[in-house]
Image (tube, helix red, strand yellow):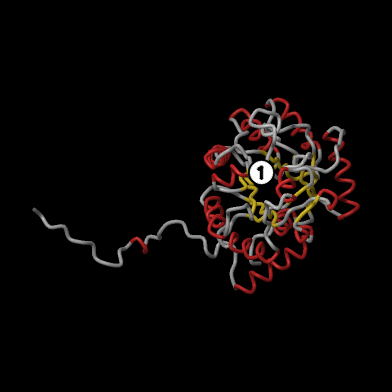
């Protein structure tokens, strides 16, 4: 295997197919409610990157219905309760804990995963997540998207790389919490060098998993307006394949690659068309790894090794006055 695939990681860990159940916990986002901005991120749709239909059911019922559906559709045996929509640590700690604990009532739910922003992980909320993580495997998925300030500004993220580094380091001090990172390739102004720098930044931190998304356009987003005005150039499939492999070559080899695609229903999707063909994209990425004869982490380099710190030339002798 050329890179550490999430599906293989889960099957190896649990011995059976594991399926994610996307949940709506009723939380919102500080980048949409006026605390940081009213616009939200340029790529975010009305569903906050979560399930594409509003689900008024209590969390326990959402999980029960999700398990029933996934057992029938995928014959899954175990499940991940994925608190996906909007920012799932943006509320009072007591409310967050109450909603997360709903997932603990299902023995077939083997993990809980929580999508959030790097600026929404204060210590009282980390206290909550640590308590949950002691009882069940828990991932915090933090949206970085890019390590570059200009890209974060263009996306209207309203957080910085410093916020992300701070969140990762403080979260990792807590017992058992695993950290996933969301990234985007193809942001305007970024190329291979910028993608590699983001990968190297992530690899230098105590991160456990990563999701890699191509920049794609959804309906009713700021990106849609840019795209329709002809102000947005998206990656071709070939460009994304090459860039994704460049990126993974610079990801630390123990980090799990949780996703290399963008997933949305066709009704909400505008462009690029190839991003809807997930299996084709993954096959082409595998083929590119084979063509290059490379693998995850093959080109990652952080600093000089002990041997490389030995000078190639003798140091200049300083003359005494």
Residue 176 in the image: state x and y as whole percent. 62, 42
Residue 26 in the image: state x and y as whole percent. 78, 32
Residue 117 in the image: state x and y as whole percent. 64, 38
Q: Residue at x 71, y 58 (%)?
A: 12
Image-based side of 129 in relation to 253, left or right: right
Q: Name the residue under label 1.
A: 141
Which quarter of the figure has residue 256?
bottom right
Q: Residue at x 30, y 64 (%)?
A: 311
- Height in image: 212 above or below 28? below
Q: Which residue lies furthest to the front in this view?
A: 229
- Height in image: 119 above or below 202? above
Residue 58 in the image: state x and y as whole percent. 85, 32
- Nearest the viewer among 41 and 91 is 41
Image-based side of 258 in relation to 307, left or right: right
- Height in image: 125 above or below 173? above
State the quadrant of the N terminus: bottom right
* Disc 1 residue crowd, few under 14, some 14–19, many 20+, Cα 10 Å: many
- Height in image: 227 above or below 253? above
Q: Residue at x 54, y 42 (%)?
A: 161
Image-based side of 260 in relation to 70, left or right: left
Which quarter of the figure has residue 25?
top right
Image-based side of 284 in relation to 106, left or right: left
- Nearest the viewer among 57 and 284 is 284
Say what secondary structure mark 1 lies in.
strand
């Amino acid at each position: 295997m050329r890179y550490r695939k999430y599906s293989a990681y889960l099957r190896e860990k649990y011995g059976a197919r594991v399926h994610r159940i996307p949940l709506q916990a009723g939380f919102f986002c500080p980048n949409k409610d006026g605390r940081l901005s009213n616009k939200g991120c340029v790529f975010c749709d009305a569903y906050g990157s979560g399930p594409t239909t509003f689900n008024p059911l209590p969390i326990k019922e959402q999980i029960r219905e999700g398990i029933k559906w996934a057992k029938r559709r995928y014959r899954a045996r175990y499940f991940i309760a994925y608190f996906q929509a909007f920012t799932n640590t943006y509320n009072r700690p007591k409310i967050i804990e109450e909603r997360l604990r709903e997932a603990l009532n299902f023995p077939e739910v083997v993990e809980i995963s929580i999508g959030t922003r790097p600026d929404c992980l204060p210590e009282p909320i980390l206290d909550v997540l640590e308590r949950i993580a002691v009882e069940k495997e828990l991932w915090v998925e933090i949206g970085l998207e890019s390590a570059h300030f200009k890209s974060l500004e263009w996306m209207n993220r309203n957080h910085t790389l410093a916020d992300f580094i701070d969140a990762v380091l403080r979260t990792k001090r807590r017992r058992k919490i695993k950290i996933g990172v969301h990234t985007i390739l193809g942001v305007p102004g970024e190329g291979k060098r910028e993608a590699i720098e983001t990968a190297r930044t992530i690899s230098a931190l105590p991160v456990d998993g990563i999701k890699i998304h191509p920049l794609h356009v959804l309906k009713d987003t700021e990106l849609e307006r840019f795209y329709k005005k002809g102000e947005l150039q998206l990656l071709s499939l070939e460009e994304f394949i090459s860039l994704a492999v460049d990126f993974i070559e610079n990801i630390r080899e123990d980090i799990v690659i949780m996703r290399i695609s963008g997933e949305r229903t066709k009704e909400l999707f505008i462009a690029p068309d190839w991003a809807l063909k997930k299996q084709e994209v993954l096959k082409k990425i595998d083929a590119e790894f084979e063509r290059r004869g490379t693998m995850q982490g093959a080109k990652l380099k952080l600093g000089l090794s002990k041997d490389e710190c030995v000078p190639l030339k003798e140091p200049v002798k300083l003359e005494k006055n």
